[in-house]
Image (spheres, rainbow, N blue to C red):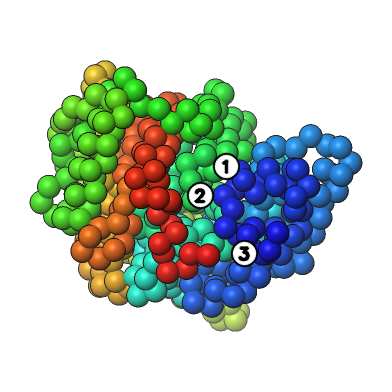
Amino acid sequence: MTGTDLVRMGAAELGAAIASGATSSVEATEAYLDRIDGVDGDIHAFLHVDRSTAVEQARRVDARRAAGEELGPLAGVPVAHKDVFSTSDMPTTAASKILEGWRPPFDATVTARLREAGLVILGKTNMDEFAMGSSTENSAYGITRNPWDLTRIPGGSSGGSSAAVAAFEAPLATGTDTGGSIRQPAAVCGLVGAKPTYGGSSRYGLIAFASSLDTPGPFARNVLDAALLHEAFSGHDPRDSTSIDAPVPPVAEAARRADVEGLRIGVVKELGGEGYQPGVLQRFTESVELLESLGAKVVEVSCPNFDAALAAYYLIAPSECSSNLARFDAMRYGLRVGDDDSRSAEEVMSLTRAEGFGPEVKRRIILGTYALSSGYYDAYYGSAQQVRTLIKRDFDAAFDNVDVLVSPTTPTTAFPLGERSDDPMAMYLADLCTIPANLAGNAALSVPCGLAPEDGLPVGLQIMAPALADDRTYRVGAAVEAALADRNGGPLLSRSAYAV
């Protein structure tokens, strides 16, 4: 097989080819490393790539297989890893200057499970600093560009991961979803992206943004590949106190089933209408009609408290980030500025945080500190948590009557770089549809559902399910994917600027 043949393959297909001996993990890894060398100068999806380390990982997988060891379906397949997961053999910076060059002494649980499953980590991907953003323009190390159109954002905060998969620099990638940071970049890059049930994937070794919201999840070019990666790194972890002690839902089995016959699907009334791009609504409506034609029963569902989700999120998430980022104090690790024996510890701390954190991180720390301050806690943070409970009740009431809920993943397609940089509220609206599932802790997935006619850019369909019913999202997503592929004569990504 040529390198082009290898990078065109989906992850499951490539894993099968490696297992059969048609190719090797080393050959596949080198093909992707060559692809990164060829195109990442345009995309800037990666912050760190170490060819020798990646090839050595691949050699070890090939040796394990040659020794007769029974390996999983993704053994030997390369993966791009978001730079928010601790990795003992390469830097972990969360795209922040305050952690520039830091090498953790341990692997995150997600990292360790990728290695155990035999996946080959190509490198660490760019992101919004500390996962705070919706465009990957907040990285301290430069912007990432959307492979569909280099003048547009790849989404965020996991934009490096989405861009890497969309540019065929990796068949799979990891991300984290705090308010939509997997689903939103997946939607605008024409990929599948999943937010597992909160607690279904471990946060141990994940650099925290908002601890009650952060959720590791997969990116892939098709639903089955996303499901296989989801299964590879999910499951109970005793080192994470929020980890759910329950079996991983059978998401790969559901993806292979790809059948919606008899399912009850609810269209969320509040996630659509004014403010949504016409082409996004058109493709969403067509997707709902497609589901109905495949045998699903479609009804409209009202979740009235979703209208307050954005406001609640932007009190809860900054409050938690204010607490979590207090550890970056110039005393223990990371950047240290002004430590010349003439300044107090408080002055060194202040200078370090001023230089080490970017504008968006500072903005959220200030907002969160204010919301948690004496006299304002109940009015702001406490009220936001009450709204969070109401949103969860809306979901519970809806799931009494339907199996899954659907909506557009994002109100618009990928917007131009720089368009919202000076307008935080406009930027925050990019996560309007995805935030409710994070506040409730439910499972959710975005699957491509076509191109918006006005700009030719990808549109995502969001599928939401109850906690620990992740398999329902994959079942519906796979059905949509198969039907659209039949209708359009192939996958959506084959029409992107960086298709191979």
- Tell me the distance, in whole angstroms, between the alpha carbons under discs 1 and 3: 23 Å
Mark drawn on residue 220: 2
First in sequence: mark 2 or mark 1?
2
Q: In this view of the protein, can residue 212 be seen by the observer?
A: no
**In the picture provided, is 91 more to the left or to the right than 484?**
right
- Tell me the distance, in whole angstroms, between the alpha carbons under discs 2 and 1: 8 Å
Residue ID at (27%, 41%): 287
Residue ID at (58%, 35%): 231
**In the picture provided, is 405 more to the left or to the right than 232?**
left
Residue 144's place in the image compared with 74, above or below, is: below
Residue 495 image offset from top left, x and y in percent:
40, 62
For badge 3, the amino acid type reads: Thr
Residue 439 image offset from top left, x and y in percent:
33, 38
First in sequence: mark 1 or mark 3?
3
Circle 2 packing at 10 Å, graded few (<14), some (14-19), many (20+), is many
Closer to the camera, 438 or 488?
A: 488
**In the picture provided, is 370 more to the left or to the right than 224?**
left
Q: Secondary structure at mark 3?
A: helix
Is mark 2 in CB contact (under 8 Å) with mark 1?
yes
Mark drawn on residue 449: none
Q: Secondary structure at mark 2?
A: strand
For badge 1, the amino acid type reads: Leu
Residue topped by disc 3: 4
| Residue sticking out furthest to the right | 67
